Image (cartoon, rainbow, N blue to C red):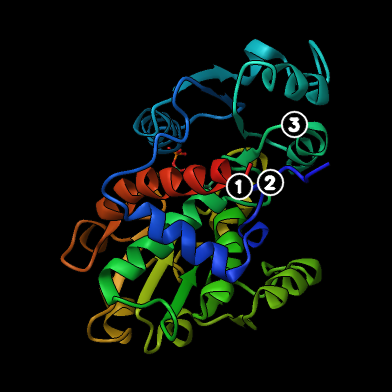
Amino acid sequence: MKQVRRFLEVDDLAADELAAVLELAADPSPPSALKGKGMALLFEKPSARTRHSMEMAVVQLGGHPVSVAGAEVGIDERESAEDIARTLACYHAAIGARVFDHAVLERMAAVSPVPVVNMLSDRAHPLQALADLLTIKQVFGEISGCRIAYVGDPNNVARSLAIAAGRAGAQFAVASPAGCRFDPVDLNRIAGSGTDPEMVEDPLRAVDGAHVVYTDVWVSMGQEAEAAEKLQAFSGRYTVDERLMSRAAPDAVFLHCLPAHPGLEVAESVLYGPRSRVWQQAENRMHAARGLLAFLLAMK
Ligand code: CP
Ligand code: NVA
């Protein structure tokens, strides 16, 4: 039996496949890969960009998205994650899920006869990383050789971005407090994607000469219990402000997956300033999702 494709992390795509997805994302006349078909989109957590970009990507491919809150299907409460995947695959050509626990996605993908797409988990946010690469490509023409500096919490977004950077031939540096680093398993996986991330405590060092300065929230969804500790660890030193941006390359841009908290991880003047590409990046969520779905469904 042919193996069903999955997209739980960026390295589920080989480097040439990733390049193909980015090409498809830029295609002004997308194929009708989902004509007459549906895609189930499950959300255990809130979403603005992911839900809307995925729904519109499905529509642009001729399909019909069905978005459902996790509680409505009751993952592992009303029935098992596996049975939910088996059931949804009876009606849909693909399944997307935003979950608290990455293992739930692995379990769904292990039994699903249709592709399962990670719409954010505690471990990874690969759809975001695709949009980030697309944005970098649009801004600089090439991703390979760019230096991406991530300042802040080495979280789901940072992990997927690091892997994406490796796959696309970019350098990756992350600045975070000493006790807040990628673990050895993450580092192995990132190294396997082709980059050896530079991990430093000093944000000025990470952004030195960077083409892209990137940050995300200090407290991710599901980490609310650690909020006080995280705010203490990051406050005062890890806000991306004008001073940090002035140490980056002269043509550097600022990216943020959003939602942003001006005054915490990023200064308002940077978020809404001339170097910010966050709205282009947000729009690219839809183009990248469309490219990915066109690719995955053409492979079936
Ligand atoms: N960047 C992102 O995933 O945004 P949402 O949480 O609004 O989907
Ligand atoms: N790291 C954030 C990203 C939100 C898009 C979170 O998981 O909440």
Label 3 or label 2, whichever comes before in sequence order: 2
Most foreground residue, 215 or 294: 294
Question: What x and y, as percent, mark residue 268?
Answer: 25, 56
> How far from the left and from the top, in percent, is residue 119?
56, 40
Q: Which mark is residue 113?
A: 3
Q: Secondary structure at mark 1?
A: loop
Q: Is residue 296 left or right of residue 62?
A: right
Assign a secondary structure to mark 2. loop
Q: Left of 201 or right of it: where is 236?
A: left
- At x 48%, y 70%, the residue is 150
Residue at the location (26% across, 60% down)?
A: 277
Mark whose residue sits in front, 1 or 2: 1
| Residue 197 in the image: above or below residue 183 | below
Distance Cα–Cα, label 3 vs label 1: 13 Å
Q: Is residue 126 above or below residue 243?
A: above
Question: Which circle's residue, 1 or 2, is located before the other in the chain?
Answer: 2
Q: Which part of the image, by quadrant, shows the N terminus?
A: top right
With respect to residue 85, does 183 lie above or below? below
Instruction: Give the residue pinned by disc 1.
Output: 299
**How crowded is the residue under tag 3: few (<14 C-alpha within 10 Å), some, or many (20+)?**
many
Q: Residue 164: image x %, image y %?
A: 55, 67
CB atoms of marks 1 and 2 within 8 Å = yes
* Residue 254 position by quadrant: bottom left
State which quarter of the image contains the C terminus: top right
Q: Residue at x 69, y 22 (%)?
A: 89
Residues at circles 3 and 2 in contact by the CB criterion of under 8 Å: no
Check disc 2 and give the amino acid type. Arg
Task: Check disc 2 and report the residue beneath it.
Answer: 5
- Measured in 3D between alpha carbons, the distance from the residue under mark 1 to the one under mark 2, in whole angstroms, is 8 Å
